[in-house]
Image: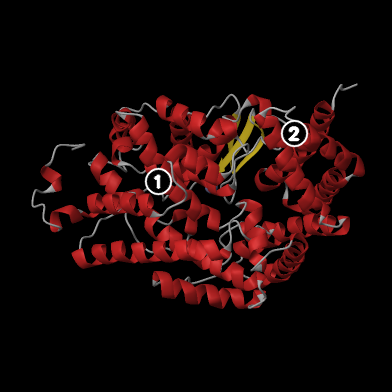
Amino acid sequence: MPSNSFDRYLEKTRTLADINAAIAVLSWDQETYMPHGAAVARAEQIATLSTLSHQMTVADEYRAILDEVKVDAANGLLEEWEKAAVRESVREFEQASKLPEDHVRDFARAQSLAQHAWKEARDRSDFSIFADSLAHLVQLKRREAELFGYDENIYDALIDLYEPGMTVAQLRPVFQRLMEGTRVILARIRESGAEVSNDLLTRKFDPEKQISFAKETVAKLGFDFRTGRVDLSAHPFCTSFAPSDVRLTTRVFSNDLRSCLFGLIHEAGHGMYEQGIDARFVRTPLASGTSMGIHESQSLFWENMIGRSERFWQWAFPKLQNQFPESLAGATPSDFFRAINVVQPSFIRIEADEMTYNLHIIIRFEIENALINGEIEVADIPALWNRKMEEYLGIVPKNDAEGCLQDIHWSFGGFGYFPSYTLGKLYAAMFYDQAKKDLPGLEDEIASGEFGRLLGWLRANIHQHGKAKRSAELATAICGKLLTEEPFLAYMTAKVEKVYGLGELAGNDVAAESAPAGA
Ligand code: ZN
């Protein structure tokens, strides 16, 4: 028998973690290998396990154990990480105990069916196939938000699930300043008249070779294939059953080099975070990322700060060219760097450039806010989506598949998740600024394909802490400041100046092309 309350607590969290991992395995299989006809059976299986997990989380016995360990924590009997684990369990308990069992079962079933409907709707580009299941999910999420409670805005209760403490009131001004900064940079590109071609990315690229190059690249960055694997799915994602079992997915198009490679680098950023969590946290609530925003900071860090940098491609481009000698004939690392950083409004969020990506997020944030607040109906989404695309990005999707049906998030009821992506970009830029200060010579290492010290820095400052620290605590400890959009806008400005040669137009007459590489 366990000898004290923390041991009894650990026994419970381990059982809960195992059930939740089993749910994650079933969900991963649903997205990768499950036959089409299994949708209803799988929905029942996931619903059963979700109900079991919920019952355990809200059981009186578990409540009693949590009460005991809370006392131990208050009496200084627990280590820091143990106190953090208890804090997270109490938060989960309080959230779960507000949800009646019938709601949990209804939601899990609605979620599975909606994912199935979404896939069919997207394949046939027919929003009406998805509309009823989406409306059902919205109704259930509104009920959930009411049960959780909120101060100002019902949508805050859902954002808080992914980014604890974040609210619409805090996000609006950040998004506003980003919109303004984005407009300034976009205007500079437009006024310069400079154009950069990305044609070389849409030539013919053998899918098998793309997958193997992407896998080799993420292995080099530090994704550990002894504790992870890669498969294909309609929408790329990362899921972790344990730090020793991390699954990534990607997708591949023979006429576009970006989707598979950058999709996998992105997911590997999530995956390396999960693989780097402190071993003591396994099968406790701390064995995951701090928040979705911090999780995105890790994927976007590798995808954008590193994977779309000039120095990275000084090292990687010859290898890529070696894989695709015909399609990339005559191209230089600089051509490639510029091609992958073209700023151009586009329909698909995950293929958008770093600059206009945030506008995609703002559209989803505004639609979700209106939907959860009951200001619009599900049936209004396609028209509203297209109107906002025209207003913010100046383009209109020709069908719903490349419009409001493109993302998987709503099909699992993930309202409140999208803002995390933009938060991730802001945190990533803050962290990269600091990493460059802490690791002199870092950029030269990147240019020679050395990522060990950088991964070590991320492990020490972010990964190992799992969920033991909150976003604000991490940002303050690492950068000495709270969330700010300034490093992101500065980083973006510098990159766009390089890609479009805007520095020359601003007064420096030396042609960038004639400068030595890496200068
Ligand atoms: Zn991501």
Decide if residue 93 is on the left or right side of residue 218.
Answer: right
Is label 2 within 8 A of ligand 1 (CB to nearest ligand atom)?
no
Q: Please, what is the three-letter code of the amino acid marked with disc 1? A: Ala
Residue 94 in percent (x, y) is at 78, 50
Can you tell which of label 1 and label 2 is closer to the viewer? 2
Is label 1 within 8 A of ligand 1 (CB to nearest ligand atom)?
no
Contact between marks 1 and 2 (CB within 8 A): the answer is: no
Choose top left, top right, bottom left or bottom right for residue 394: bottom left
**Disc 2: which residue:** 73
**Disc 1: which residue:** 429
Q: Please, what is the three-letter code of the amino acid marked with disc 2? A: Ala
Q: What residue sits 69% from the left and 59% below the top?
A: 413
What is the total number of numbered labels drawn onto the structure image? 2
Choose top left, top right, bottom left or bottom right for residue 382: bottom right
Residue 338 in percent (x, y) is at 28, 49
Closest to the observer, 165 or 419: 165
Q: Residue furthest left?
A: 509
Badge 2 element = helix
Q: What residue sits 49% from the left and 49% below the top?
A: 424
Residue 478 visible here: yes
